[in-house]
Image (tube, rainbow, N blue to C red):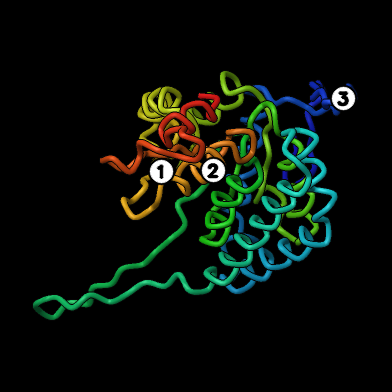
Amino acid sequence: MATGDGGQSASTSSIRRPKKSRHRWPPADAGDVDAAVGAARTCFESDEWRKLSGRKRGAMLAKAADILASRLDEVAKLETVENGKPFFESKIDVSMTIETLRYYAGWADKLSGETVPVEGPYFTYIRREPVGVVGAIVPWNFPLNIAGWKFSPALAAGCTVVLKPATETPLTALAMADVMREAGLPAGAFNVVPGAGSTAGAALVRHPGVDKISFTGSTEVGKRLMKDAADTVKRLTLELGGKSPQHCLRRCGPGRRSKGCPERNLLRQGRGLRRRKPAPGREQSEGPGGRTARRAGEEAGPW
């Protein structure tokens, strides 16, 4: 387990690369999750973190983006090792994480409240405060990019984070812990608990010290998370579903549909969660070489 202070579990697991070499990593169990949540809670309640201005938090996120940019090839290679996608695609994904960090770095000092006009001699205002400890659970298809969508806004808002990467893709998350440490985040602000969903993930969702869970994954698992989170009345953000549909307008000709839809579906070996939805009418009935656009899409997809 990698935490903000560099703590680690004693046991190890491994990832097999396509070229038969292995990369070992320490899987987290319920005890490790408890330690990570404890570190995140201690940091969240500390003066070092609570009195840190939004501008300084933003500066740390911007520095993390610069460090990640300087290690772009290194981290992209890790993503290719663990995920199997081509190196150039991994570089795109890591570059998107860099942009996400920079975007939310700019938001960190702009999360202000507001005054509300009401009838009578009253002063009414809204103050926005950080939720607390955020548990982030991410899938394996875009491991660092999706994680960045979760930890960047959480840290910008003043929350602390416990990130649970997919079992298959923990390496970039562990590398990100190093980046955050180098960027100057206090111990416990950013923690990583690589492990199975049934152990580390379930422990994170059920933990009473976690205030919010942000999860991306299947609808089936999302339903279980809702039940597990109910006991501690956690806030939940769930990004669930299957193969996202593509809607083709009538003016999009059959040639473009039969070419574009399979390409989008097969991007990243079909793991980009994209699927086309043909437009109604005769336009969908023909494609290049006599093949129909509908048939081309059906044959191309692995689902």
Please provide percent x and percent y for residue 66: 76, 66
Callout 1 amino acid = Gln
Q: CA distance from mark 1 to mark 3?
A: 38 Å
255 to 290, vertically: above or below? below
Q: Which residue is mark 2?
A: 264
Of pointers 3 and 2, the one earlier in the residue sequence? 3
Secondary structure type for disc 1:
strand
Q: Which residue is mark 1?
A: 246
In the rendered structure, are the residues bearing label 2 and label 1 in contact, judged by CB atoms less than 8 Å apart?
A: yes
* Crowd rating for badge 2 (residues with CA inside 10 Å; few <14, some 14–19, many 20+): some
Residue 38 screen position, x and y as percent: 62, 38
Q: Nearer the viewer, mark 1 or mark 3?
A: 1
Determine contact: label 3, label 2, CB under 8 Å.
no
- Assign a secondary structure to mark 2: helix
Q: Residue furthest bottom?
A: 121
Circle 3 packing at 10 Å, graded few (<14), some (14-19), many (20+), is some
Which residue appears at 74% of the width and 52% of the height? Answer: 91
Please report the residue visible at 37 percent of the width from the left and 39 percent of the height from the top: 277
Q: Amino acid at mark 2?
A: Arg
Q: Residue 178 location in percent, x, y?
A: 79, 49
